[in-house]
Amino acid sequence: MDDFETQAGTTNAEQDLNIEPQSSGGGLDSSFFIFLVGFVVIIYFMSIRPQQKKMKALQTMMDDLEKGDEVVAAGGIIGRIKDIKGPYVSIEVSENITFKLQKTAIANTLPKGTIASID
């Protein structure tokens, strides 16, 4: 062992100045938290917010359904709304053929006259 080192591994000069050896990081620095907050903000604007907008538009579409609207069901069935009772709609797909569906099964509304142009 050298004359300049004690058993603790520090030099005499360090002991005289009461200098403690630096630790090799045990805590988290602020750049980690900035990165974490930035990541959460990016996830919110790229994932959560667009989903909320889509759900709001879908809810608005379901609330605005009226008798006579031409719609497409989730399975691709095209028809005209014949009756609305609470969360259910009756869709006439052909003369004397009516399906009863939940409003949530309506995928989209069509412009007036779409069914007539298909026939």
Image: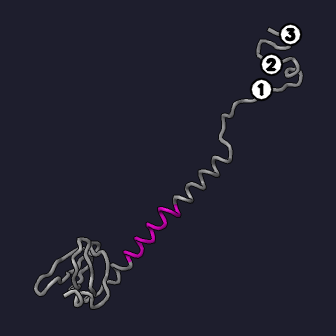
The residue that mark 3 highlights is: 3
Q: Earlier in the sequence, mark 3 or mark 2?
A: 3
Query: What residue is disc 2 on?
Result: 10
User: What residue type is disc 2 on?
Assistant: Thr
- The residue sitting at 37% across, 75% down in the picture is 59
Q: Position of residue 58 (x, y in %)?
A: 37, 75
Question: Which of the two residues, 69 or 113, is positioned nearer the viewer here?
Answer: 113
Q: Which of marks 3 and 1 precedes in the sequence?
A: 3
Q: Position of residue 116 (x, y in %)?
A: 22, 90
Hey, what amino acid is under mark 3? Asp
Distance from Cα at disc 3 to Cα at disc 2: 11 Å
Can residue 54 be found in the magenta stretch?
yes
Neighbour class for label 3 at 10 Å: few (<14), some, many (≥20)?
A: few
Residue span colored magenta? 44-59
Residue at (30%, 84%) from the top-left corner?
110
Where 4 falls versus 27 (above or below)?
Answer: above
Residue 21 numbered tag? 1
Q: Secondary structure at mark 3?
A: loop
In magenta segment, residue 41: no
